[in-house]
Amino acid sequence: MSVWQSIVVAAYGVVVALCLARHFLWSWAMRRTPFLSPDSPRFEGGEAPLVSVLVPAKDEEEGVAECLRSLLQQSYPRFEVLVADDRSADRTAEIVERLAAEDSRLQLVRIVDLPAGWTGKCNALDQLQRRAQGEWLLFVDADTRHHPECVSVAVEEATRRSADLLSLMPSLDARTFWERTVQPFAAMCLMILYPLPQVNDPNRKDMGFANGQFILIRRSAYEAIGGHASVRDRFVEDVQLGRRVREQGLSLRVAMAPDLFSVRMYATLREIVRGWTRILYSAVDGRPGRLYMLAAFILAFSVLSYAVLVGTVAALAVGRSTPFVWTMLWLGAAHEILQQTMFARIYWTTRSRLAYLAFRPLAVFVMLYVAARAIRTCSTQRVVWRGTAYGGEVV
């Protein structure tokens, strides 16, 4: 091999070694990440504090009934459920009203107007918390489904750990091809930006994070950080709430809970692209630096192996059987095996279907496109979401 070929092999060997190191890092991270399940300790002793479950709903007729039924079936003894119909154009309000007539613990609040300077979800949750009576506020999305022990386990965990805010990470309810292909990879991208061991480290003031699909927060803590009014203009308000809790010196805890609740975020490829563009843009506060790093990470760890394998196989096909080509081929194969096994572990954690690992290249390129859109949004500062335009140029 020539000098430059030796340099290329050495550099690529470092990338492959880092892929191997990721397995050890993942094991270390999982050991430091709390996991909750239906078998975890649940609230049983003493007088149960009232929990107000607050659900924002805009055009959620397809899944809101299933979400609310799962909440009303909770084993926890004291809770109320308040749902905001946020200017829906479908049958969301009608469905909630019908369920409320059957269970007095459920209330419907109608949102007619969106005040200037507010995002829709923040306004809906702010209106709900004004009517809530609970000592604890539980914010959940209308596309979630909850195990009957979910609230009881969460309250016990927050109480035992003296957490002011407890947020849970779900399993992914994926039903279409693109959901099953892209969603696990997209979730991994978010965890690259916010690794849970760092999120749960009280000394990491820069790693405040929460998952808006499930946020349990003491009302006293919620009021101390200024509530949703303090993040009124944010598209991904959950990360900002977690950040404010951490900045105020309050206790923040995020746990994996794939067997306690699930979420179906987006059904189509178009929804996935638009939704994750918004999430990544907001997760970095509209500053693209970390998105460039994420794109570089995807290119180095997920795209490079494909390029090497295709290039070396093509070289062998035309008769260029050299030590350099064979070395790069074996490194490329090792790289891809390490990546596939890494993602198998991630898929297991999110309860995703392992068969869809075969389509990981599609997920890789979709998320590169999403990252590019999010970077562009950082320059335009405009987002259209659920029929409402915010900021400047439409994305």
Image (cartoon, rainbow, N blue to C red):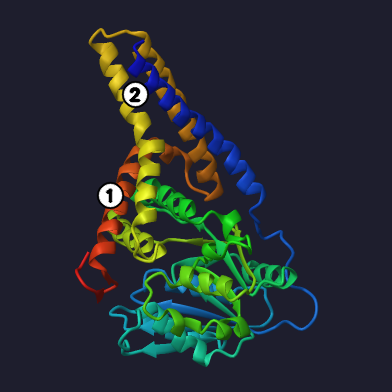
Residue 169: give x, y in percent of width and height: 54, 60
Q: Secondary structure at mark 2?
A: helix
| Front residue of this view, candidates 64 and 207 | 207
Q: In which quadrant is the C terminus drawn?
A: bottom left
Residue furthest to the front = 3
Residue furthest to the right = 45
Q: Is residue 359 visible?
A: no
Q: Amino acid at mark 2?
A: Leu
Q: Which mark is residue 309?
A: 2
Residue ID at (44%, 67%): 143
Residue ID at (30%, 60%): 271
- Which image quadrant for residue 317? top left
- For residue 67, above or below residue 362: below
Residue furthest to the left = 393
| Front residue of this view, candidates 173 and 312 | 312
- For residue 101, above or below residue 395: below
| Badge 2 or badge 1: first in the primary sequence | 2
Q: In which quadrant is the N terminus drawn?
A: top left
Q: Which mark is residue 148?
A: none
Residue 328: give x, y in percent of width and height: 38, 19
Q: Which mark is residue 369?
A: 1
On screen, residue 337 versus residue 271, left or right, reads right
